[in-house]
Image: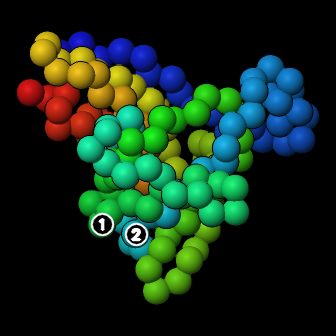
Amino acid sequence: MLTRGFVWRMVAAGTLAAALDACIWPTRTPCVYEIPEGFRGWVLIEVENLACPMLPKRDGKLIFSLSDRGVLCTSSKLEEGWATDTYFFVGQSRTPIRNTGWGGGGLIWGGSRGECEVTGKPAHSYESFFVGSEDEFKSAPAAPEPEACRT
């Protein structure tokens, strides 16, 4: 198995940083991540899997509705570029999740994208991030890969 292509996603803080990013990076469709209320742990989103449905759009944004286990499979391709993504706990209510840097009290950590290739199988692209406190993230096991990457 060969894993390659991790790209760390960064969140621009402040108007100047956002303006500079917009000049350097092209824009993309913003994403809304709907995470089950009370979920803690790694989120794993397998993309470009033709056996899975396309991501829906609502108000011009791609909607990622995760399962109770924090996983999602879609045939959609992830776009490259800059956008302001939003995260929500969904269940009895719809609660925004703060996304901040170290020491900021946020709950979204370690976002990455990857691709794996297993001999004789098509490549699998995926995205992952951690939902929880900074301490939970620091003591969490390594980010997961799609099942197809492990065999």
Q: Judge whether residue 105 can be spotted in this image.
A: no
The one nearer the camera, 16 or 94, is 94
| Label 1–label 2 contact, CB within 8 A | yes
Residue 26: image quadrant is top right
Say if 25 sits above or below 15 in the image.
above
* Type of amino acid under label 2: Pro
The one nearer the camera, 24 or 73, is 73
Residue 148, percent from left and from top: 17, 32
Residue at image mark 2: 36
Cα gap from disc 1 to disc 2, whole angstroms: 6 Å
Image quarter (top left, top right, bottom left or bottom right) of the N terminus: top left
* N-term-proximal mark, 1 vs 2: 2
Q: Residues within 10 Å of mark 2 (few under 14, many from 20)?
A: some
Residue 92, percent from left and from top: 46, 86
Q: Residue at x 14, y 13 (%)?
A: 119
Residue 10, percent from left and from top: 63, 33
Say if 26 sits above or below 96 in the image.
above
Say if 79 sits above or below 43 in the image.
above
Residue 136, percent from left and from top: 38, 52
* Type of amino acid under label 1: Asp
The numbered dot on residue 41 is none
Q: Residue at x 24, y 13 (%)?
A: 2
Residue 145: image quadrant is top left
Q: Residues within 10 Å of mark 1 (few under 14, many from 20)?
A: few
Q: Secondary structure at mark 2?
A: strand
Q: Which color mode does the image show? A: rainbow
Residue at image mark 1: 68
**Apparent side of residue 33 relative to residue 101 in the rendered image (left or right):** left
Q: Secondary structure at mark 1?
A: loop
**Apparent side of residue 80 relative to residue 114 in the rendered image (left or right):** right
**Apparent side of residue 53 relative to residue 12 in the rendered image (left or right):** left
